[in-house]
């Protein structure tokens, strides 16, 4: 789902990217500034559906899973 979100955002002209980080033992979605590679936001994987809805892409993501 993170890959689909990144593709959608890139196609719509929004440059920020997201990645899954499991280094700390918990699955965390990190928002990355592609200009400098820095983490600018962090969300638990449980928050991902709300994040997608907030970005207006939940239908795209969940329809892609069907």
Image (spheres, rainbow, N blue to C red):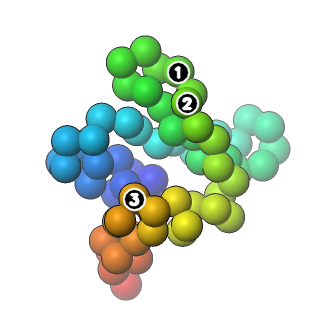
Residues under numbered marks 2 and 1 in contact, where contact means CB atoms less than 8 Å apart: yes
Residue furthest toward the front?
54
Most extreme residue toward the bottom is 66
Report the front residue among 16 and 26.
16
Q: From this viewpoint, which residue is outermost toward the right?
A: 25
Q: Which quadrant: the N terminus?
A: bottom left
The circle on residue 55 is 3
Q: Which residue is mark 1?
A: 38
Image coordinates of residue 29 in percent, x first then y, are 59, 47
- Mark 1 surroundings within 10 Å by alpha-carbon count, few (fewer than 14), some (14 through 19), many (20 or more): few
User: Viewed as shown, does residue 48 lie left or right of 4?
Assistant: right
Q: Residue 46, how many percent across, how many down?
A: 68, 64
Residue at mark 1 to residue at mark 3: CA–CA distance: 20 Å
Chain-order first, disc 1 or disc 3: 1
Q: Quadrant of the C terminus?
A: bottom left
Q: Residue at x 34, y 76 (%)?
A: 59
Residue 47 visible in rendering: yes
Q: Which residue corresponds to mark 2?
A: 40
Q: Vertically, is 38 above or below 55?
A: above
Location of residue 60 by image quarter: bottom left
SS at badge 2? strand
Alpha carbon separation for disc pair 2 and 1: 6 Å
- N-term mark: 3 or 2: 2
Q: Residue 58 versus residue 22: which sits nearer the camera?
A: 58
Toward the viewer: 35 or 64?
35
Q: Residues within 10 Å of mark 3 (few under 14, many from 20)?
A: few
Q: Secondary structure at mark 3?
A: loop
């Amino acid at each position: 789902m993170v890959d689909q979100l990144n593709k959608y955002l890139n196609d719509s002209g929004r440059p920020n990217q997201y990645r899954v980080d499991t280094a700390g033992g918990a699955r965390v979605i990190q928002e990355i500034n592609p200009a400098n590679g820095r983490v600018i936001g962090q969300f638990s994987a449980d928050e991902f559906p709300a994040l997608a809805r907030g970005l207006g892409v939940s239908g795209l993501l969940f329809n892609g899973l069907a």
